Amino acid sequence: MRFDVVSAAPEVFSGWRTTSMLGRGQSAEAITIEVHDLRGYGIDRYGTIDDSPYGGGAGMLLKPEPLAAAIETAQGGDPAVPVVLMTPQGERFCQGIARELADLPRLVLVCGRYEGIDERVREHLVTRELSIGDYVLTGGELAAMVVVEAVARLVPGVLGDLESVADESHSEPLLEYPHYTRPAEFRGERVPEVLLAGHHERVRLWRRQEQLRRTLERRPDLAAHWRLSDEDRRLLARIL
Ligand code: 6GU
């Protein structure tokens, strides 16, 4: 899968793009991440990319001509390549959207900046608008990194064999169970005995029970999306 990011601050992506999972994913040719510098598409002799809003008001908007040119270049001349605008006005990003996006061969991510972008670019070129949560960031760069990471790790060949995508938080609406490694006692706390005994079925049941317990304690909103098996119901009855 290929990601093309359009940003007025491309330097913030440099270390991130080549580090750990993303670096390995690119070496394995499972993903490609290109960052396009919006400033390279500036107009007039000053390379202007922003301007004040018609009708007045505070802040600056990204001008339509440079942004449209950068997006079209990022699409590689194919108008069918989806364009996601990162903006606090967008739909809230979640694991389900990450799974949808991971099925695409290409994706353009546009980092909003300043007070926003000219509405006509949104209408003509933007396919989807995403936010990463209910708080305000100055630019969409961090949000674009969040989306690329969440999507890239679902692309086959990006994660190693030992890192599994299947049984982790938010693939089911359940949080993860607690994890322990050596030593068996740390600051007076022992690892739960069930994990030391080596009985695989008991370990599986204990982990499932702790997932249910944690989710009820920390994210009761997720329980509305549960589809419980008979076994889950028995484990829940024990917790409650
Ligand atoms: Cl996508 N952009 C900005 N600027 N702020 C945000 C956001 C995006 N998601 C949450 N806050």
Image (cartoon, helix red, strand yellow):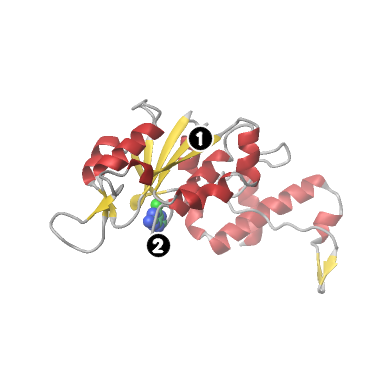
Whole-percent x, y for residue 23 in the image: 63, 41
Which sits earlier in the primary sequence, circle 2 or circle 1? 1
Say which of 210 and 1 sits in front.
1
Q: Residues within 10 Å of mark 2 (few under 14, many from 20)?
A: few
Residue 224 against residue 34 in the figure, above or below: below
Is any atom of residue 165 visible in this view?
no
Whole-percent x, y for residue 166 in the image: 63, 40
Say which of 137 and 198 sits in front.
137
Say which of 170 and 37 sits in front.
37
In the shown orientation, is residue 105 left or right of residue 41?
Answer: right
Q: Residue furthest front?
A: 45
Is any atom of residue 237 visible in this view?
yes
Instruction: Report helix, strand or loop for mark 2.
Output: loop
Cβ of mark 2 under 8 A from ligand 1: yes
Q: Residue at x 25, y 36 (%)?
A: 124
Q: Residues within 10 Å of mark 1 (few under 14, many from 20)?
A: many
Q: Residue at x 48, y 28 (%)?
A: 105
Q: Please state, as top left, top right, bottom left or bottom right, where the C terminus lies in the image.
A: bottom right
In the shown orientation, is residue 164 left or right of residue 53?
Answer: right
Residue 52 against residue 41 in the figure, above or below: below
In the shown orientation, is residue 63 left or right of residue 21?
Answer: left
Instruction: Report helix, strand or loop for mark 1.
Output: helix
Q: CA distance from mark 2 to mark 1?
A: 25 Å
Q: Residue at x 38, y 62 (%)?
A: 136
In the shown orientation, is residue 164 left or right of residue 153?
Answer: right
Q: Mark 2 is on which residue type?
A: Tyr
| Residue under pointer 1 | 102
Please tell me in which quarter of the rendered image ligand 1 is found. bottom left
Residue 183 against residue 197 in the figure, above or below: below
Q: Mark 1 is on which residue type?
A: Ala
Q: Residue at x 61, y 50 (%)?
A: 233
Tag shown at residue 135: 2
